[in-house]
Amino acid sequence: MSALVLALIAGAVVGLALGALGGGGSILAVPALIYLLGFSPATATTASLLIVAATSATALYAHARAGDVRWKAGTLFAAAGVLPAAAAGAAAARLPQPALTAAFAAVAALAAVRMLRPRGAAVRAGHAERPARAVSAGAGLGALTGLLGVGGGFLAVPALVTVLGLEMRAAVGTSLLVISVNSLASLVTRGPTATGLDWAVVGPFLAAAILGAWDGKRLASKVSGPVLQRTFAIALLAVAALMLLDVVA
């Protein structure tokens, strides 16, 4: 199968995940870029940030039209992550490639476990908003975004529910604002790896992801959220296992 076809398929899946779940796209984008399209881990995380930033902004527009974005809460949460995202993005280029891959696999496994947990307990725990926790959660998410090239929606959604007390639909929409801001902040510090991107692959990947985000928003309104989330979590566990095997092999 040609690189163009693989890029289109992978991009569509990434867009569907972001549009339907408000996160998770980069968790799929990075392994797809490395294992299907031959990118190095450092270049893959940079390409992922670019793809996720543009796709998240597209999905954000769709959710905002439906009134599912809490702009004030999302802006405060995202602002706390801007500097950590930029600092971690600059540090990522100096880390060994196997270390980045192993860290990414661990985060993917964590995301899968969180997605498989019953949602009700998280919602009940989050009615008391705590500004200090919101700032620390936003900063941690920004650092993760910069270091591993993930938008962090899989962590932003539960954090927005439990820390800021948002309902799930609003958390999904608001997480897209957080992802967009953090991804752009990290990209600013990744000049060296950004200049070496293969745009013949990244361009089609990005276009397919943007189109997939619109389909993901429609899919979320038709398919049960828990079903989508469990399916995605199982796929994440498989990806994490394969990446860890690659590191130790």
Image: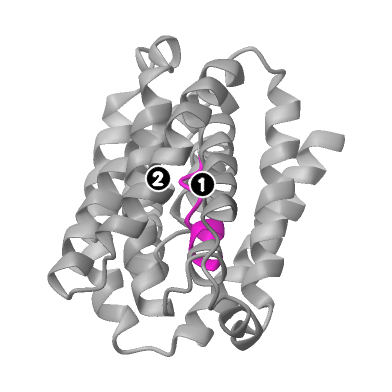
Which disc, if any, is residue 138? 1
Answer yes or no: do the residues labelled 2 and 1 have beta carbons within 8 Å?
Answer: yes
- Whether residue 153 is in magenta: the answer is yes
Can see residue 12? no
Magenta segment = 150-158
Q: Which sits in the foreground, 12 or 162? A: 162
The answer to which image quadrant residue 247 occupies is top right
Q: Residue 189, percent across and down?
A: 42, 17
Horizontal relation, residue 196 to residue 136: left or right: left
Mark closest to the chain's N terminus, 2 or 1: 2
Horizontal relation, residue 60 to residue 30: left or right: left
Q: Residue 75, percent across and down?
A: 32, 49
Residue annotated with mark 2: 78
- Whether residue 110 is in magenta: the answer is no
Q: What residue is shown at x 35% (from left), y 55% (from top)?
A: 74
How many residues crowd around disc 1 within 10 Å: few (fewer than 14), some, or many (20 or more)? many
Q: Which sits in the foreground, 199 or 217? A: 217
